[in-house]
């Protein structure tokens, strides 16, 4: 097994395109586990952490650009990011232990291709766009379009996620993420739910996005959630519609973490609770 | 395939070693540098027995490739005591009998030290969440938490 740590994403993309079974190394918290379990035996590991773009959080056009290899701990230590996108940061911080937080990344969480990834619904709700670098240059892709099915991504050969762009926020806007797990810590979501919303000065919802994780083959953007909330004061009637929209979007599997029926039910409960947290935060902005 | 030549700083000493790509930092510490304080428990980042800090950041050394350590500043349990003088956390672990078989102890101590460096006055809840990635199969958690809280209190007095 070879190891390369190029200084540019262009060089990394070239390496990735040239090998048949190369893997990108960001935080390694999934890759090294899969290598150890012999699920993966790559001939080449390409470490992208020498590339500044992947390791930096910066403000851009009123929003944020977050490198794909920024760690969960680094997200938490960025006060402005936490203030503007508290739901995204709390979602990323739910992954693993303190030790795992020191290494795990949102780029890896997305590219690992798990429907239960915690940071992915939060990125989708935030309207995040991934910037991808490949052998043919750069392109932008909405985060909800990246994952197609478990372990299957809409990236072509040699393409690497470089960073995520989070759009500018107006006043009275915030987000939240909740997941259901049977324990209090260190577990994988049975259902995950992220809501991002904005209010006008009168408290009427002007924008809303909701994403659910672990209830389908990939994290879902629930389009009907926006219909339920926008134009309302996020009152009980709107929340009831939101709950119904969440449940209607679910196409879960039965597994050891939860049954279909349980996941569908919990998705509705979490949708309401998550929306109420985002609402409370948005009102304080 | 040639081995990687890695230069790093371990417990403030410059070190050099050769490793294969598939050797983890934990393998390199134990097998190449003979620093066997960090333990191999699960090798999947679940148990925390291999905890070290890299450039001050707490990580599982089983989830880091040895070659990634090039140019990094690593701290392990071997660097915790200053000669014969135990770190306050180590002293409090003895006083509170906060260990039974001891396999998890180096990782717990490194993790607790990283917590107190960041937050000298953690609540018990913060301490329990911070240490949630350090498993103790003897299940002596309560004494571990008491020892960390006591050490934190003593270190604040000394600061």
Image (spheres, coloured by chain):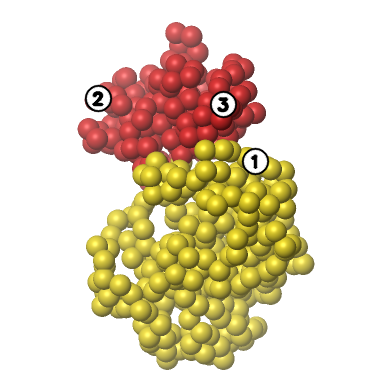
Chain colours: A yellow, B red
Task: Tell me the chain of label 2.
Answer: B
Question: Residue under circle 1?
Answer: A5
| Residue B22 seen in this snapshot | yes
Q: Quadrant of the N terminus of chain B?
A: top right
Task: Check disc 2 and report the residue beneath it.
Answer: B101
The picture places residue A146, in percent across and down from the top left corner, at 55, 69
B33, above or below A173, in the image:
above
Give the chain letter at badge 3: B
Mark linked to residue B3: 3
Please indicate, yes or no, whether residue B111 appears anywhere in the rendered image: no
In this rendering, position of residue A247 left or right of residue A234: left
Query: Are the residues flagged by discs 3 and 1 from a single subunit?
Result: no
Measured Cα–Cα span from mark 2 to mark 3: 36 Å
Query: Regarding mark 2 in the picture, which secondary structure is present there?
Result: loop
* Secondary element at image label 1: loop
**Residue contact between numbered discs 1 and 2, judged by CB atoms under 8 Å:** no
Q: Secondary structure at mark 3?
A: loop
């Amino acid at each position: 097994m070879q190891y390369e740590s190029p200084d540019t994403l262009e060089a990394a993309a070239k390496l990735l395109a040239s090998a048949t079974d190369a893997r990108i190394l960001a935080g390694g918290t999934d890759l090294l586990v899969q290598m150890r379990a012999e699920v993966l035996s790559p001939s080449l590991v390409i470490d992208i952490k020498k590339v500044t773009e992947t390791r930096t959080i910066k403000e851009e056009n009123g929003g944020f650009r977050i490198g794909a290899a920024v760690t969960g701990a680094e997200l938490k230590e960025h006060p402005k990011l936490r203030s503007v996108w508290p739901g995204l940061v709390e979602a990323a911080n739910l992954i693993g232990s303190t030790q795992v937080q020191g290494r795990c990344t949102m780029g890896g969480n997305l590219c690992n291709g798990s429907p239960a990834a915690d940071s992915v619904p939060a990125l989708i709700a935030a309207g995040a766009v991934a910037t991808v670098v490949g052998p043919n240059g750069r392109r932008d892709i909405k985060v909800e379009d990246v994952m197609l099915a478990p372990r299957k991504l809409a990236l072509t050969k040699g393409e690497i996620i470089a960073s995520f762009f989070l759009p500018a926020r107006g006043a009275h806007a915030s987000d939240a993420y909740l997941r259901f797990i049977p324990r209090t810590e260190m577990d994988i979501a049975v259902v995950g739910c992220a809501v991002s919303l904005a209010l006008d000065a009168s408290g009427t919802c002007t924008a809303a996005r909701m994403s659910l994780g672990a209830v389908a083959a990939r994290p879902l953007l629930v389009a009907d959630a926006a219909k339920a909330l926008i134009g309302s004061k996020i009152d009980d009637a709107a929340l009831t519609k939101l709950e119904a929209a969440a449940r209607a979007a679910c196409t879960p599997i039965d597994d050891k973490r939860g049954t279909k029926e349980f996941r569908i039910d919990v998705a509705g409960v979490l949708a309401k609770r998550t929306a109420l947290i985002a609402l409370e935060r948005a009102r304080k902005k | 395939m040639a081995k990687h030549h890695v230069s790093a700083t371990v417990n403030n000493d410059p070190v050099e070693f050769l490793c294969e790509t598939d050797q983890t930092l934990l393998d390199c510490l134990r097998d190449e540098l003979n620093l066997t304080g960090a333990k191999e428990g699960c090798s999947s980042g679940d148990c925390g027995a291999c905890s070290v800090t890299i450039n001050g950041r707490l990580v599982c050394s089983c989830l880091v490739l040895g070659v990634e350590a090039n140019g990094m500043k690593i701290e392990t349990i071997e660097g915790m005591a200053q000669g014969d003088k135990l770190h306050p956390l180590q002293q409090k672990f003895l006083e509170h009998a906060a260990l039974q078989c001891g396999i998890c102890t180096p990782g717990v101590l490194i993790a607790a030290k990283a917590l107190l460096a960041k937050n000298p006055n953690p609540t018990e809840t913060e301490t329990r969440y911070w240490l949630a990635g350090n498993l103790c199969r003897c299940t002596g958690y309560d004494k571990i938490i008491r020892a960390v809280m006591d050490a934190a209190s003593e270190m604040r007095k000394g600061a």
